[in-house]
Image (cartoon, helix red, strand yellow):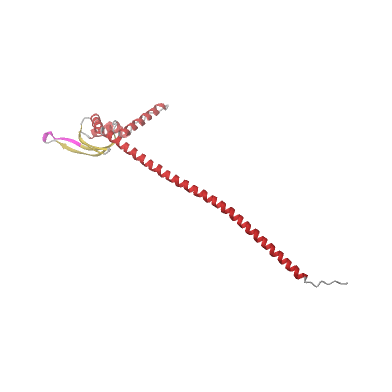
Amino acid sequence: MIKINLLPHREEKRKQLKSDFYGLLLLAAIAGALVVVVVSAYFGRELSIQNDKNDFIKKEIAQLDERIKEIATLRQEIDGLKARQQAVEDLQGDRNQPVYLLDELVKLTPEGVYLKQLNQDGQKVTLAGYAQSQDRVAEFIRNLGNKSDWMFKPELNDIHSTGLGQGRDAKKVFEFKVNAGIKRPREREEAASQAAASAAAATATPGSVAPAAPASSAASAAKKP
């Protein structure tokens, strides 16, 4: 006897497959949503931790900036105090400069040179006077440049021939003007220390030769009367 299945089994099978497919899709969607939620939560937590670290670093940077400003302000105050202290020391040292200058000028002014004027402007001095000859002026400038402890870099500003006196007593002299710099006490001490160190180094060096005198100095010395 032949049995014939009249039920729509193919339709039932298709429905079952569709149902299984939709179920798998639903499970995949749920799994994907869970993954997204878990990943979002993880990255959100990491982002929150990083933001906290950034905030902490910003606070520390702000505190360091404040400290740097305070240090800069302190340094400015210290520099200002040092400048004022140096100014006070310079003023105290400069009070005796005229005495030192006059004492040196008495020793360094050669015979035949007469100083009539001395003007000090800050750390510069202008000397004006008369001389019997140009050689006397050259000797005076050499003395200021080589033998003076308080004056340096003398420069001849003006020299010209003029007459001094009247009638038979009139004499031909040279009127001159010399500019020179003035050392402060601390600058004088520094220069003396450097000179002593150079002399010690030259003495310690074997086979050292004394420096030759400049040609200009030798020529001027030859002209000295």
Q: Quadrant of residue 4?
A: bottom right
Instruction: Give 75 or 53, whichever is nearer the viewer.
Output: 53
Residue 80: x and y in percent read 34, 40
State the image coordinates of residue 153 (x, y, percent, origin top left).
30, 36
**Left or right, residue 48 beside residue 177:** right
- In front: 147, or 45? 45
Q: Quadrant of the C terminus?
A: top left
Q: How many marks?
A: 0
Q: Nearer the viewer, residue 130 or 53?
A: 53
Residue at image point 69% right, 65% down: 22
Seen at 67% across and 60% down, the residue is 28
169 drawn magenta? yes
**Residue 98 falls in which quadrant of the image?**
top left
Q: Quarter of the image for the N terminus: give it.
A: bottom right
Report the span colored magenta: 167-174
Q: Is residue 89 above or below residue 38?
A: above
Query: Looking at this rendering, what residue extends furthest in the right direction?
Result: 1
Quarter-of-image position of residue 109: top left
**Residue shown at 34%/38% (left/top)?**
81
The residue lying toward the viewer, choosing from 167 and 117, is: 117
